[in-house]
């Protein structure tokens, strides 16, 4: 079924229903637009990894009156006037926005790699090998924590690179090719945004570097996307070749700095299984009688037990501990029995609406997980608002860092308390059983963090986002995967985590 929407007579949405496992997801096909603001002060906004917008040097371009620039202009004019059908389609596709498209590509890769390793003949679960990513099992296993991290680094690299690009754009103030030569017809909307360095090339180069590191088996595919994306401005008549080269070099340099952080954030030790014995003993001392244990046969090692030690973006380790939810209801207490009784009642009398909600929000294997779900909300909302590239990148960076922080904080909580799943008390589920402790709910924590940030950016949609978060949280009770306390405390935790990202957003200079 297709739905058509027209926004201000300029934007065409063709909503295509895609089926991925349990979910029905509408992904829009989009066309280019002119943003209401080019965010001319974007080069002054606060960065995440760069110390300043000028940390990476971009050389001054040749003057528009020089023979060198005139030759470049002639080359752009010639190429823009003789595009093949495939090149025109490429411009149309990427014209929807470089940040938007690369986030979409990242989510697709997350879904492709979100497959837990199967057991081998020895009854063991091989660990994916980053050095041999296409061997079975493929690297990475893009579970929710991994996906939250991949998307956050992608968004941060895009944002920091664009803040730097905006700084140099307005420092050098070179007009676009079609403005310097009125005989060049641009295939993309023409604005007063300076063309040097090319924003499309900046985003393409930064995105390629991050995604190749996160999905090393996708080199040929990502190289193809890079080749398409970095020259879109040139093909469309916006850029000359030196605009593109400057963008490629800047994006690559910024992404290298972002990846330097990634290499030291603790992710390499996130699957350290040796830490679990101490975690279990600590949980028992707090009164957890039956710590969580895998319900799979053969027993599967717990998923990323040390992810809670990975570096966060918007608060420090002391804050991580400070905001950790309190001890949950313990077995045999009145409160615990009440939660168990609710699940037993749902198991016996689950409604069709409860089943629908449980399945829609499952976001299990072969999907882009809850973090991807909220990135999609963010990207589509930014598109509907017709955000500039830099403001779209800011939106996804605020959401992405909040979601990664939510993953780290939730996993810290899960393995700190090591609480049993309802399945250890005889409850069954039809939406897949996660292989890690119960308290708190990851769906609830991710969703509350995402909804909090998006409600700040798009206050007119706050009621809708909060409704989504509550439904995502309820889905885990309806799916018999979590106790009510897991979800209620996950929502509260996620809201606090989201508030830290909001505080950063209010102080990043973008409101000036």
Image (cartoon, rainbow, N blue to C red):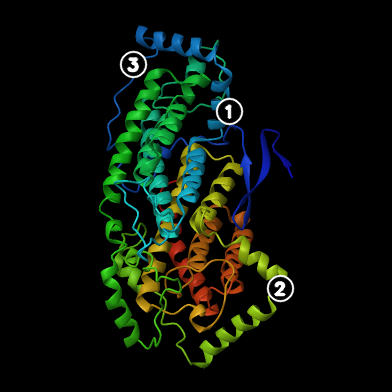
Q: Which residue is at a point 52% across and 61% down the rendered structure image?
A: 452
Q: Which residue is at a point 38% across and 33% down the rendered structure image?
A: 205
Mark 2, residue position: 351
Is the C-beta separation of discs 1 and 3 under 8 Å?
Answer: no
Q: Earlier in the sequence, mark 1 or mark 2?
A: 1
Q: Earlier in the sequence, mark 1 or mark 3?
A: 3
Mark 1, residue position: 92
| Other-residue count near label 2 (Cα within 10 Å), few / some / many at <14 / 14–19 / ≥20 | few
Residue 62 bears which disc, if any? 3
Q: Nearer the viewer, mark 3 or mark 2?
A: 2
Which residue sits furthest front?
Answer: 121
Distance of mark 3 from mark 2, alpha carbons?
Answer: 68 Å
Report if residue 199 is visible in the image.
Answer: no
Distance of mark 1 from mark 2, alpha carbons?
Answer: 44 Å
Q: Secondary structure at mark 2?
A: loop
| Other-residue count near label 3 (Cα within 10 Å), few / some / many at <14 / 14–19 / ≥20 | some
Left or right: 274 in relation to 391: left
Q: Nearer the viewer, mark 1 or mark 2?
A: 2
Q: How many numbered discs, if any?
A: 3
């Amino acid at each position: 079924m297709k739905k058509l929407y027209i926004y201000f007579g300029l934007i065409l949405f063709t909503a295509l229903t895609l089926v991925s496992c349990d979910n029905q997801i509408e992904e829009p096909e989009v066309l280019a637009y002119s943003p209401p603001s080019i965010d001319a002060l974007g080069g002054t906004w606060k960065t995440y990894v760069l110390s300043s917008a000028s940390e990476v040097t971009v050389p001054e371009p040749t003057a528009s009156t020089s023979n060198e620039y005139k030759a470049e202009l002639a080359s752009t004019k010639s190429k823009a006037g003789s595009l093949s059908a495939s090149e025109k389609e490429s411009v149309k596709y990427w014209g929807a926005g470089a940040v938007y498209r690369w986030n979409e590509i990242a989510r697709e890769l997350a879904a492709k790699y979100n497959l837990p390793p199967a057991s081998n003949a020895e009854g063991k679960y091989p660990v994916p090998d980053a050095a041999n990513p296409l061997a079975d099992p493929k690297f990475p296993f893009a579970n929710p924590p991994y996906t939250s991290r991949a998307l956050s680094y992608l968004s941060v690299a895009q944002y920091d690179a664009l803040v730097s690009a905006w700084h140099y754009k307005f420092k050098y103030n070179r007009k676009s090719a079609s403005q310097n030569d009125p005989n060049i017809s641009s295939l993309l909307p023409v604005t007063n945004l300076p063309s040097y360095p090319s924003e499309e090339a900046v985003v393409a180069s930064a995105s390629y570097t991050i995604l190749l590191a996160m999905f090393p088996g996708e080199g040929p595919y990502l190289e193809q996307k890079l080749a398409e994306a970095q020259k879109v401005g040139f093909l469309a008549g916006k850029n000359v070749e030196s605009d593109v080269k400057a963008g490629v070099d800047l994006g690559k340099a910024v992404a290298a700095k972002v990846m330097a952080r990634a290499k030291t954030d603790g992710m390499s030790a996130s699957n350290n299984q040796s830490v679990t014995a101490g975690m279990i003993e600590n949980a028992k001392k707090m009164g957890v009688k039956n710590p969580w244990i895998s319900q799979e046969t053969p027993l599967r090692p717990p998923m990323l037990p040390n992810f809670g030690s990975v570096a966060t973006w918007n608060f420090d380790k002391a804050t991580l501990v400070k905001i950790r939810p309190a001890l949950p209801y313990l077995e045999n207490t009145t409160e615990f029995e009440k939660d168990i009784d609710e699940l037993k009642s749902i198991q016996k009398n689950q409604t069709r609406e409860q089943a629908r909600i449980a399945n829609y929000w499952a976001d299990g294997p072969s999907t882009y997980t809850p973090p991807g779900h909220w990135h999609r909300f963010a990207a589509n909302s930014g598109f509907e608002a017709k955000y500039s590239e830099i403001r779209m990148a800011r939106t996804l960076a605020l959401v992405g860092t909040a979601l990664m922080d939510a993953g780290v904080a939730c996993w810290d909580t899960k393995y700190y308390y090591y609480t049993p799943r309802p399945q250890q008390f005889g409850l069954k589920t039809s939406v897949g059983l996660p292989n890690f402790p119960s308290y708190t709910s990851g769906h609830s924590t991710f969703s509350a963090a995402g909804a909090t940030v998006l409600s700040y950016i798009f206050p007119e949609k706050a009621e809708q986002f909060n409704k989504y978060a509550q439904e995502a949280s309820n889905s885990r009770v309806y799916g018999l995967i979590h106790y009510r306390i897991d979800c209620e405390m996950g929502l509260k935790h996620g809201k606090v985590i989201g508030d830290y990202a909001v505080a950063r957003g209010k102080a990043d200079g973008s409101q000036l």
